[in-house]
């Protein structure tokens, strides 16, 4: 029986001030293999009898395929097989609503780089030589090279589906009384802004190896962030049961969203492995990685906001036009994301959001770090800077006055829980000396502030289902070692370390006694993958649950053996002991033995399903998240007024992390986000060359190389001061939120704002190239408007808006039952397979087209 | 992985053998390979046989003498930067060499290869597959120059960072071919043609670089400014190399300014007519800078907006000459310094 | 003009161990290290000299293995990431990179570590500018570089037996300013 003065043990949880591992900087669990060269990435794998695949890619932007002549190529040395599209007729795509891709083009190509044929040969040299010998005849179709061209050119359609012509998706949503809001405003501000596309540029080029094990069993090793979705796509396209396909995500050499789609080469090697009965490998070249793309959409935006004199906002109207490239990818979600999170930082009583995504003959765009939000966030934060000037309110003060309170439901029905944005702004304001220096620095030097918010995991999975989004299994045995099984994929963000640390913390064991088995669809429970900043929160919660269940079993057994009530047992230092007398206890392995003896073989599971969000209108599925992270950043810049060249000297960034599970990794994510944000702000551009129309239909990537696609290097980074704000969110594991994407958001607008503070030039587009700054300076010198950016936003018919009453108005999260709103539902769908959707369209069954 | 096409590779130990091999069809010469191999991987330079200079002894090393310095063609760029005397006597030249790409590349690349480096263009430095999609261009296999579609010539730009400053410093090179050897000024090595950019026969080998003592730091002041996007790796999109000789009264006796990357060869600016006989001052420098802007022909075939690069030719020329004159430099300096590693 | 490539043989001395290999003469050191010697620790991101991922040391000098023919590497002393640790002990650079979180995805790291090793051998106490310059040919998309620079400084200190450590804010948050009134 417990001594009278002893207290029940405090379990390792977020309320426990005595966490041993969580919150302390520790070496990441894969740290050693990553500095010794031991860690194997997908391209490091090889198997006996392995053959190599090289893809023949389209050399024209838009065309019907007339003929593919492989006769010469087939005769070349080493060639084992050449595969064409008809062998893989089933289309796929990450979103059920846009399954518009074929592993190899069938009849039609949609951009330069679209795969047309796959050559397998004994060596990669031979595969390449033969691929060059494949001759493809095309019947060229008109080139759709931009949003503007797509708007003007409904025919020929790049795809036979989509909302109209070459417009893939149209969105029109209205929350609250927007027009009244504008009427109540003292000042209405309007900005037209352009955000150039850019790409992830992971240093590891995508690679995949498939190994056949039987006529209908195969394993794919791939550099993917989403093994589960690749698994599903393979089952679909190869038409064999998912249970016969095993997908193993190797450690990923950088993803940033670029390895979250199922890719052509993954499907092709798997198919070929089954066909040839031998291992098949494809490693993309750098140029091919640019063709996979799925990067940041170029977005043209128009933002109008009504302000009262005190700085509060009355209404906002945002219009966005996305250049989607040749396929759907995540595009429908991306389109919604260019508006969904606009309401999460500042109170916005009424909000209208209209968007359109165009198909163009370029590599498909998709999700890149921040998925769809950096573009409107850029527009919003430079817009606020201008508003602050107009209203004569300090930009930091303007933001503080408008802060969305914690535990709010926004106009578009997002549930925002904890928010540390106030502390974030206060931290960077103090750290940078903002109050003393902003607006007062000598000509050429300036400070800029911006904020942002991001999801900690998308509330809904990519395909509709009622299952958990993350699962964790634990296996414990008499050795005292704990094996953790989870489908999550380590892409460098440190998810393996988070997983191991949570389990180790709860069971009181050291990291060295934990073994991980991750991202293996045969062996690990499903986790949806490393995207939307979901892993720490969702996998973390599942891991907590599994570990707590294991602790309970062990505590029961140990309690019985030592005759101590379970809740008086402490799990720490690889022991399980009595809180009143630490000497009374068992080693962890003895404790597991006790449990194994009592309960038999030990295993526990944990699952996580996000809470259901209150929005019920069509489109409400994009934006909800269990909780949101917040960031504020200030940049200091020095601009050379002679040339427009500038240098970012310092970045102060504060991030609401909820709770830092491992502060070193959190800081690393912040620095990496600042880096990537600066790249986008300063130099990165996914740019294309349209050859003169009268001479050629060609539309090519301008610079598909690491040399000419400029990404910042060692000499291009400023000093960074990072502040972690811990709000201890009740929805996060140990209170933790995300950090992989949020800190990128404020960087681009903060730079634009800093340039304005330095030289009085507004650059309403990114990247902020020096020639643009100089152009602004020259205009200013001539007394003209010192602004560089798009002149206007095109006329677009977004359709009648879906009207939704806000919580403030007493709405219920559903669209207002407005016949006008209803009429549109048949057009754009948000779920269901393409087939289901087509069927529904035929039967005019609009109910089948709605998600919620 | 992007790989080299199959080739026959030779690395003879005698220069004569290298020269003899070059006489056959479809043979290319390689030194450090940092230009040739990428070009061959992308397949815009092709060869059946590649013959290497790297096994030929005696072509490497820096030899300081009273007439100046002799640098063997195979001397690595890293060795030049690390040579204390080079940095002291020809700071602008070493600065130019230190600005070439990145440290590991500089330890492979040779100075001879740098002078002979192929001209560049973003329509040309692309893979075979990419170039197929534009139906090639004048410089390789095609019929049109996409940079200037009506132009009968290729506008690929000179890419060597050492070339403009060596021209400015009156350096010379020694060429050895089947017909013997000759020494020519570096400025005579180049031709204003994106395709046929070198005034040397394909079987002539550059064996030695000579920089005269007359252009060392005791006799003249020189400067090198390179414009590029990042602080490393990138080629110049513009460079300015300048050297000014003055008498004891600070009157200019001779001056040279060359621009890099804004023409198919280093572009010589006529400065002597403005500067000789005068002391360097802001006003004259301004005029030189304007001439530089006029002489530059930046095309849309590399990084940055072409017009802005032209404007930058003015700024950078101004900055380089101000640096030489000891006048305040107002233009933001490049991010890279001359850091020895 | 279809040249048939010839195969050649060489004994490559890698990390002080001899590897007798046969390979096509047009194969680069990168290909031969990874495919013939099984040393996949050396990575590649472009194969064109643009990223530094493939860097190894040849006779102590950093080179880009994607731009060097393996045929040129015979009789020379090649060092790769696999040879950085001594038996089972990490090199100070490896310790510092692992503990400071200077590696994220880890893909660019082998190349960076080799460049850093070459630097520390030449300059045991490098300035920040020297570190940045020495590593400037290596691209990383994850870390933002600053932490790598700090890790090299830390490793240099460890190697010199100096007990300098990166400042606390490299491991924890910079302390938050007092909340304003
Ligand atoms: C990523 C990257 C960045 C680069 N950045 C720069 C830069 O900033 N500035 C710059 O100037 N260059 C740059 N280069 C180009 C190149 O690396 C350098 O110019 C280098 O000095 C070339 O030397 P090399 O010995 O490697 O040449 P190689 O590739 O061996 O040869 C280049 C050419 O010169 C010929 N050649 C070589 N040696 C001789 C000789 N002795 N006699 C006659 N012909 C010869 C060859 O046949 C070949 O055509 C860069 C290259 C890369 C890949
Ligand atoms: S300048 Fe014209 S011809 Fe020359 S490489 Fe470029 S596109 Fe080709
Ligand atoms: S792979 Fe060698 S430099 Fe990129
Ligand atoms: S750690 Fe991922 S690229 Fe550097």
Image (tube, grey):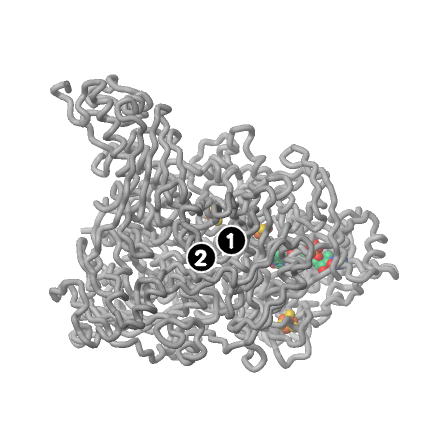
Q: Is residue B210 visible?
A: no
- Dot 2, how many residues are within 10 Å of its Cα: few (below 14), some (14-19), or many (20+)? some
Front residue of B86/B326: it is B86
Q: Residue A671 carries which label?
A: none
Left or right: residue A553 versus residue B294 is left
**Image location of residue B221, percent across then percent down:** 65, 60
Residue carrying label 2: A237
User: What is the secondary structure assignment of the residue under circle 1?
Assistant: helix
Q: Residue A599 in the image: x percent, y percent?
A: 26, 26
Residue A338 quadrant: bottom left
Q: Residue A271 carries which label?
A: 1
* Residue A191 can be seen in this image: yes
Q: Mark 2 lies on which chain?
A: A
**In the figure, is residue A678 to the left or right of A2?**
right
Q: Mark 1 lies on which chain?
A: A
Q: Does the residue labelled 2 lie within 8 Å of ligand 4?
A: no
Q: In which quarter of the image is residue A402?
A: bottom left
């Amino acid at each position: 029986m417990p001594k009278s003065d002893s207290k029940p043990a405090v379990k390792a949880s977020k309320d426990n001030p005595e966490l041993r591992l969580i919150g302390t900087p520790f070496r990441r669990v894969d740290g050693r293999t990553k500095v010794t060269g031991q860690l194997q990435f997908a391209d490091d794998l090889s198997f006996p009898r392995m053959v190599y695949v090289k893809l023949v890619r389209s050399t024209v932007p838009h065309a019907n395929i007339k003929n593919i002549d492989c006769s010469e190529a087939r005769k070349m040395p080493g060639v084992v097989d050449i595969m064409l599209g008809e062998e893989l007729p089933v289309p796929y795509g990450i979103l059920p609503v846009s399954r518009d891709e074929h592993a190899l083009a069938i009849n039609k190509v949609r951009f330069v780089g679209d795969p047309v044929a796959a050559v397998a040969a004994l060596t990669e040299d031979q595969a390449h030589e033969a691929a060059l010998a494949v001759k493809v005849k095309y019947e060229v179709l008109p080139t759709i090279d931009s949003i503007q061209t797509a708007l003007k050119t409904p025919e020929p359609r790049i795809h036979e589906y989509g909302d109209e012509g070459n417009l893939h998706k149209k969105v029109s949503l209205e929350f609250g009384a927007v027009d009244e809001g504008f009427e109540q405003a003292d000042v209405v501000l309007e900005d037209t802004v352009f955000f150039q596309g850019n790409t992830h540029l992971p240093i590891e080029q995508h690679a995949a190896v498939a190994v056949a094990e039987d006529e209908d069993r195969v394993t794919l090793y791939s550099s993917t962030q989403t093994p589960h979705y690749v698994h599903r796509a393979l089952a679909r396209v190869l038409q064999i049961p998912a249970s016969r396909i095993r997908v193993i995500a190797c450690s990923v050499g950088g993803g940033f969203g670029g390895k979250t789609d199922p890719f052509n080469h993954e499907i092709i090697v798997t198919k070929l492995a089954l066909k040839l009965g031998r291992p098949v490998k494809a490693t993309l070249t750098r140029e091919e990685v640019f063709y996979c793309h799925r990067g940041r959409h170029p977005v043209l935006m128009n933002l109008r906001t009504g302000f009262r004199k005190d700085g509060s906002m009355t209404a906002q109207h945002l219009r966005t036009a996305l250049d989607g490239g040749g396929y759907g990818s995540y595009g429908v979600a991306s389109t919604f994301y260019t508006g969904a999170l606009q309401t999460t930082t500042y109170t916005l009583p009424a909000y209208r959001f209209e968007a359109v995504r165009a198909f163009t003959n370029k590599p498909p765009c998709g999700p890149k770090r921040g998925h769809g939000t950096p573009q409107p966030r850029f527009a919003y934060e430079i817009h606020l800077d201008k508003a602050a000037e107009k209203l004569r309110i300090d930009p930091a003060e303007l933001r503080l006055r408008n802060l969305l309170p914690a535990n709010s439901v926004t106009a578009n029905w997002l549930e925002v829980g904890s928010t540390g944005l106030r502390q974030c702004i206060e931290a960077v304001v103090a750290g940078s000396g903002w109050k003393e220096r902003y607006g007062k620095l000598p000509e050429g030097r300036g400070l800029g502030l911006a904020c942002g918010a991001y999801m900690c995991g998308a509330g809904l999975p990519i395909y509709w289902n009622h299952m958990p989004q993350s699962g964790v299994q634990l296996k414990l045995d008499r050795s005292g070692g704990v094996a953790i099984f989870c489908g999550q994929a380590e892409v460098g963000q440190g998810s393996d370390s988070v997983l191991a640390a949570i389990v180790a913390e709860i069971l009181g064991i050291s990291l060295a006694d934990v073994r991980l088995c991750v991202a293996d669809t045969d062996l690990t429970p499903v986790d949806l993958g490393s995207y939307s900043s979901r892993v720490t929160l969702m996998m973390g919660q599942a891991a907590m649950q599994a570990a707590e269940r294991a602790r309970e079993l062990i505590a029961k057994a140990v309690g019985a053996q030592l005759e101590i009530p379970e809740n008086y047992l402490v799990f720490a230092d690889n022991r399980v002991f009595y809180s009143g007398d630490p000497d009374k206890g068992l080693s962890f392995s003895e404790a597991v033995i006790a449990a194994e003896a009592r309960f038999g073989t030990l295993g526990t599971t944990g699952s996580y399903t996000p809470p259901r969000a209150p929005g019920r209108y069509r489109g409400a599925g994009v934006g909800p998240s269990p909780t949101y992270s917040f960031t504020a950043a200030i940049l200091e810049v020095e601009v050379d007024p002679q040339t427009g060249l500038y240098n970012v000297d310092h970045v102060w960034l504060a991030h609401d992390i909820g709770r830092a599970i491992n502060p070193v990794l959190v800081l690393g994510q912040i620095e990496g986000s600042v880096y990537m944000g600066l790249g986008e702000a300063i130099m990165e551009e996914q740019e294309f060359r349209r050859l003169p129309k009268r001479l050629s239909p060609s539309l090519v990537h301008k610079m598909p190389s690491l040399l000419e696609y400029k990404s910042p290097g060692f000499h291009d980074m400023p000093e960074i001061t990072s502040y972690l704000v811990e709000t201890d969110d009740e929805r996060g594991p140990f209170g933790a939120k995300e950090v992989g994407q949020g800190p990128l958001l404020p960087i681009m607008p903060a730079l634009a704002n800093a340039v304005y503070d330095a030289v009085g030039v507004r650059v309403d587009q990114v990247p902020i190239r020096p020639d643009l700054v100089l152009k602004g300076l020259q205009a200013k010198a001539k007394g003209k408007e010192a602004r560089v950016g798009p002149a206007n936003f095109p006329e677009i018919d977004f359709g009648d808006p879906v009207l939704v009453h806000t919580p403030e108005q007493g709405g219920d999260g559903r669209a207002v039952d407005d016949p006008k709103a209803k009429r549109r539902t048949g057009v754009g769908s948000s779920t269901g397979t393409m087939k289901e959707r087509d069927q529904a369209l035929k039967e005019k069954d609009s109910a089948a087209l709605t998600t919620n | 992985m992007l790989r080299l096409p199959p080739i026959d590779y030779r690395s003879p130990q005698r220069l004569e053998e290298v020269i003899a091999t070059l006489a056959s069809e479809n043979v290319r010469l390689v030194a450090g390979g940092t230009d040739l191999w990428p070009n061959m991987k992308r397949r815009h330079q092709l060869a059946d046989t590649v013959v290497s200079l790297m096994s030929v002894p005696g072509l490497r090393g820096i030899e300081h003498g009273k007439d100046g310095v002799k640098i063997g063609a195979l001397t690595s760029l890293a060795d030049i930067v690390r040579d204390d005397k080079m940095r002291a006597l020809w700071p602008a030249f070493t600065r130019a060499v230190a600005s070439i790409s990145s440290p590991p590349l500089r330890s492979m690349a040779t100075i001879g290869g740098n002078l002979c480096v192929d001209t560049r263009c973003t329509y040309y430095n692309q893979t075979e597959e990419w170039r197929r999609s534009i139906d090639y261009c004048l410089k390789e296999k095609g019929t049109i120059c996409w940079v200037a579609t009506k132009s009968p010539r290729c506008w690929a730009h000179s890419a060597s960072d050492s070339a403009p400053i060596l021209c400015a410093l009156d350096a010379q090179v020694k060429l050895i071919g089947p017909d013997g050897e000759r020494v020519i000024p570096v400025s005579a090595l180049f031709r204003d043609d994106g395709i046929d950019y070198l005034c040397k026969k394909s079987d002539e080998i550059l064996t030695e670089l000579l920089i005269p003592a007359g252009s060392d730091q005791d006799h003249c002041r020189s400067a090198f400014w390179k414009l590029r996007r990042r602080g490393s790796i990138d080629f110049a999109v513009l460079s300015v190399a300048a050297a000014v000789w003055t008498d004891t009264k600070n009157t200019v006796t001779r001056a040279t300014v060359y621009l890099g990357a804004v023409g198919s060869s280093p572009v010589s600016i006529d400065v002597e007519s403005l500067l000789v006989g005068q002391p360097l001052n802001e006003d004259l420098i301004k005029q030189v800078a304007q001439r530089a802007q006029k002489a530059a022909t930046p095309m849309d075939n590399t990084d940055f907006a072409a017009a802005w690069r032209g404007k930058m030719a003015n700024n950078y020329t101004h900055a380089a000459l101000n640096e030489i004159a000891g006048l305040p430099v107002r233009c933001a300096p490049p991010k890279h310094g001359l850091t020895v590693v | 003009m279809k040249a048939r490539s010839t195969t050649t043989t060489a004994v490559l001395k890698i990390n002080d161990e001899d590897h007798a290999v046969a390979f096509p003469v047009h194969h680069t050191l990168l290909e031969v290290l990874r495919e013939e010697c099984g040393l996949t620790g050396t990575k590649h991101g472009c194969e064109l000299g643009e990223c530094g991922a493939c860097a190894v040391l040849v006779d102590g000098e950093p080179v880009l293995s994607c731009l060097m023919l393996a045929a040129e590497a015979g009789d020379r002393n090649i060092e790769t990431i696999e040879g950085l640790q001594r038996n089972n002990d990490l090199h100070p650079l490896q310790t510092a990179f692992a503990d400071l979180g200077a590696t994220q995805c880890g893909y660019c790291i082998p190349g960076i570590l080799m460049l850093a090793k070459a630097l520390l051998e030449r300059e045991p106490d490098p300035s920040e500018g020297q570190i940045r310059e020495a590593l400037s040919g290596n691209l990383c998309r994850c870390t933002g570089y600053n932490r790598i620079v700090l890790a090299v400084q830390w490793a240099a200190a460890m190697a010199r037996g100096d007990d300098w450590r990166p400042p606390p804010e490299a491991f924890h948050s910079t302390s938050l300013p007092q909340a304003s009134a």
